[in-house]
Image (spheres, helix red, strand yellow):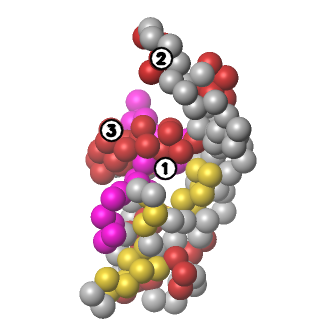
């Protein structure tokens, strides 16, 4: 039986990282039209700009998919990261909850944010949020 290969469009875990040098721009990326505003220079080297704990190009769509905003020109480091690989498994094991949290709908501005009364359910998001967690795909088709 072939190994299970996760669907990137329902994941996004490997786009999460806290280090500002998480995704380096490599010589292979010369000629790729990566927008300058997507890049950050650190000590003379270029990296993908990170924001809120993930690559700033990771974008939540209205249907709650997480997609790469520059998929066609994404850097070599991202292309080399294969779904189903050992590294992919590690990223999913450690960072999938962050991606799931990003997929949750934003609260409306007037939402009541007071904690729910005691009970084991108090740590869970409301049922309508759980019900809306998508089962779709993340990285866009080319
Ligand atoms: S390569 Fe792996 S960790 Fe990255 S988005 Fe795809 S399934 Fe998730
Ligand atoms: S460039 Fe795209 S694929 Fe690479 S880490 Fe950023 S969002 Fe993910």
Marking on residue 122:
2
Of residues 9 and 19, which is closer to you in this image? 19
Distance between mark 3 and mark 2 Cα atoms: 25 Å
Which residue is at 64% across, 42% downward?
106
The residue shown at (31%, 83%) is 42
Helix, strand or loop at label 3? It is: helix
Q: Residue 51 appears at what percent x and percent y?
A: 46, 63
The C terminus: image quadrant: bottom right
Q: Which residue is mark 1?
A: 12
Q: Is mark 1 within 8 Å of ligand 1?
A: yes
**Horizontal and vertical percent for residue 133?**
61, 31
Q: Secondary structure at mark 2?
A: helix
Residue 11 painted magenta:
yes
Q: Residues within 10 Å of mark 1 (few under 14, many from 20)?
A: many
Is the residue marked by circle 3 packed among few (<14), some (14-19), or many (20+) residues within 10 Å?
few
User: Badge 2 local density, few (<14 within 10 Å), some, or many (20+)?
Assistant: few
Which quarter of the image is occupied by the N terminus? top left
Question: Residue tagged by mark 3?
Answer: 93
Question: Eyeballing the image, is 112 above or below 105?
Answer: above
Q: In this picture, which residue range is highlighted in magenta?
A: 1-22
Question: Which sits earlier in the primary sequence, circle 2 or circle 1?
Answer: 1
How far apart marks 1 and 3 lie (CA) works out to 12 Å
Identify which residue is drawn at 48% across, 44% down: 99
Report the number of numbered marks.
3
Examine the rendering and report whether any part of residue 29 can be seen: yes
10 within the magenta span: yes
Identify the residue shown where x is 61% and y is 65%: 69
Q: Position of residue 58 (x, y in %)?
A: 54, 59
- Contact check, label 2 and label 1, Cβ < 8 Å: no
């Amino acid at each position: 039986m072939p190994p299970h290969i996760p669907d990137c469009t329902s994941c996004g875990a490997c786009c999460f990282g806290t280090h500002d040098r998480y995704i380096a721009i490599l010589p292979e990326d010369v000629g790729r039209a990566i927008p300058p505003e997507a890049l950050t220079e650190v000590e003379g080297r270029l990296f993908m700009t990170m924001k809120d704990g993930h690559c700033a190009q990771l974008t939540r769509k209205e249907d709650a998919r997480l997609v790469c905003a520059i998929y066609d020109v994404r850097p070599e480091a991202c292309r080399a990261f294969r779904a189903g690989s050992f590294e992919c498994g590690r990223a999913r094991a450690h960072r999938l909850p962050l991606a799931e949290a990003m997929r949750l709908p934003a609260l409306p501005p007037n939402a009541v944010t007071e904690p729910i009364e005691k009970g084991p359910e108090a740590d869970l998001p409301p049922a309508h949020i759980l019900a809306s967690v998508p089962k779709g795909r993340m990285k866009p088709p080319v």
